[in-house]
Image (spheres, grey):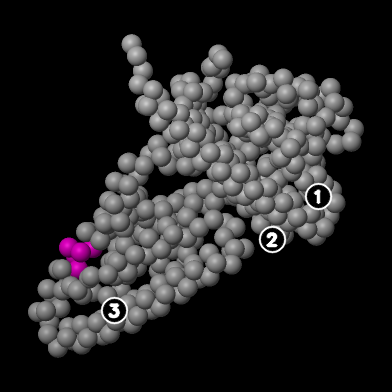
Amino acid sequence: MSINPNKKKQDLERLMAKYFDEYQSLQLLRSQLNEALKTGYFLMSKSRMSMGLKSLGQLQYPENMKSSVLIKKPIDSDCYIDLTKDCYTVQTKEEIQQNHNNNNHSQHHKQQQQQTPQVLQDDDEEDNVSPFSQYNGTSSNTTASSKTATTAKKIEEDSQTRKRATATTEKSDNNNNSSNGNKSNGGMMKSTSMNRIEQLLDSATLTESFTSNGNNGRKHIDTADHTTSDDEYDDFSSDDYSDDDKDRVSQKMVSLTNRVKRQKKKSLKANPIYWFGFLTPTTLKQSQSQFNQGKKKKKN
Amino acid sequence: MAAKNMTENALVAVIGDEDIVTGFLLAGCGQKDKKKTENFLVVDNKTSISKIEQSFKNFTQRNDIAIILISQKIADEIRPLIDEYNQVIPTILEIPSKDHPYDPSKDSVMLKVKRMTGAD
């Protein structure tokens, strides 16, 4: 079997071009890694100056630690021969888990978006924020601005519902039949909204802000016009419910809140910066981010 | 070259001074179990070369390590061992330390690349 010499030459040229491309990317990544490490060392020295000489070293390493950075690589041995394949892919455990549950999560998220009202969505956003995000200037600014926007929206909605409530009470004073109709509607809505609250409590993640602000001095509004999610919580705060229902729901809320607190504690302890104390300097956090960048650069 | 029976998700091993190891542990590379099996080695003035060589051999023989990060200064101390090493996985990557900047002319990977292109 004869091999076409022209084809062989083309293959060689293509491989040579690929080799130089890889070499160029290696040089680039190498320089980026060196730069990231240089900045990381500098910031670590600065944080050592502020924390003390012995407070940032191997004395603070914990007894047991688990790597959060894993390198995913192909099991087959093709990467030994084929240079076009990336042998290594740096992934954190979260990314691996995220890829693993990607389809399920997207479907579940869509369903949750349909069911979850705005208040709980905001709480989810607060949960997703890293506990150290307050130290990062940009992220904290964005979250702060979004928080102010949501609170302004809530205040506006509250004022509108109060206006509606006063209008309805005036109408109910003038017309008894309409008020009876409203009461019957209210009875129907009581059961539906109760179920709704239980569903939400089962599905959604609550935070302390919800427990502190959810029933914060709002009046019960017995109208047929319930459009917003806040109105549903207003229904729950009324006197029409039995004490057992209230106790049950409040117990669920408390247990969920405690669960969220435990998750937050776990995530905080999982971060290695926790080894060096709670109030670590900003330079150490910056140094950590620099080493994170360097870790990603060594993919080559 | 015989392929190692590697695990799918592997670790990053670090050999370096305290700053290097602390930095990469902060980035989440550290692993230490109850049997005191670590994937890092802190090298200081008191650490002997035999200990560095021993830990390097351990890291290269382990099948749950994919990359070994080693400070170039420490790599110079065990250069014959690194030059002998000819496996792909775990890959050895020489990194600069705080006191010693990176020198590509000493890096074993870059020397191999240069040899391939015929630059030498």
**What residue is at 69 percent from the left and 61 percent from the top?**
A282
Q: Which residue is mark 3?
A: A161
Report the mark closest to the observer, 3 or 2. Answer: 2
Callout in the foreground (2, 1): 2
Secondary structure mostly taken by the magenta-highlighted segment of the chain: helix
Q: Residues within 10 Å of mark 3 (few under 14, many from 20)?
A: many
Query: What amino acid is labelled 1 in the image?
Result: Ser
Q: Position of residue A221 (x, y in %)?
A: 27, 75
Of A198 and A122, which appears nearest the observer?
A122
Tell me if residue A189 comes above or below residue B62 in the rendering: below
Residue at image point 59% right, 47% down: A28
Instruction: Identify the element where label 2 is drawn.
Output: helix
Residue that mark 1 sits on: A55
Q: SS class of the residue under badge 3?
A: helix
As shown in the figure, which amino acid type bears the numbered disc 2?
Thr
Q: Badge 1, how many Cα within 10 Å: few under 14, some, many 20+?
A: some
Which of the 4 quarters of the picture holds residue A191? bottom left
Q: Is residue B72 above or below residue A242?
A: above
Q: Is residue B82 visible?
A: yes
Report which quarter residue A101 is drawn in. Answer: top left
| Badge 3 or badge 2: first in the primary sequence | 3
Considering depth in this image, is B104 or A80 the residue closer to the camera? B104
Q: Which residue is mark 2?
A: A282
Q: Residues within 10 Å of mark 2 (few under 14, many from 20)?
A: some
Q: What is the chain letter for disc 1?
A: A
Q: Quadrant of the C terminus of chain B?
A: top right
Q: Is residue A188 magenta?
A: yes
Label ID, residue B53? none
Amino acid at pointer 3: Thr
